[in-house]
Image (cartoon, rainbow, N blue to C red):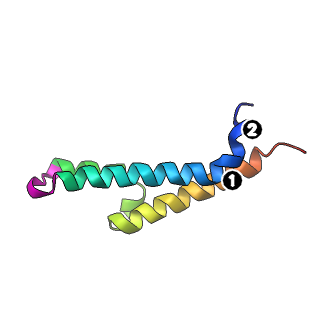
Amino acid sequence: MVFRKYSKHLQWALPATVFLFDFLDMQWMFSHEPALSYEVVTRFRLLLLPGTLLFTPVPAILLNCGIAALIGTFRSLVLKPNS
């Protein structure tokens, strides 16, 4: 399986990717801040799912990264090559 070669990197790469995606989306939203429209706010909240179901944007990013870390750890343990 192709994932076995890269599974040791999932523990840090998946949360880092989620954080980068959330951070870039936050920057995009703040670049429209003087004229925030309903469309911009809705897109921002949709892109931060599932975190925005429970929290405001900053804790939502932390929740998303936590979920990504759990998924990355689980996948690395499951796909860990037998040594």
Which of the marked residues, 1 or 2, is nearer the chain's N terminus?
2
Nearest the camera: 31 or 3? Answer: 31
Q: Which residue is drawn at 50% across and 59% down?
A: 65
Residue, disc 1: 74
CA separation in Å, label 1 and label 2: 13 Å
| Disc on res. 12 | none
**Residue 33 placement (x, y as % from top left):** 15, 57
- Quadrant containing the C terminus is top right
Residues at badges 1 and 2 in contact (C-beta under 8 Å)?
no
**Residue 28 placement (x, y as % from top left):** 26, 49
Residue, disc 2: 4
Magenta residue check for 62: no
Give, as a three-letter code, the residue at label 2: Arg
Element under label 2? helix
Q: Is residue 17 above or below residue 63?
A: above
Instruction: Categorize mark 1 by other alpha carbons within 10 Å: few (<14), some (14-19), many (20+).
Output: some
Give, as a three-letter code, the residue at label 1: Phe
Instruction: Categorize mark 2 by other alpha carbons within 10 Å: few (<14), some (14-19), many (20+).
Output: some
Point out the stretch of residues depicted in magenta: 32-38
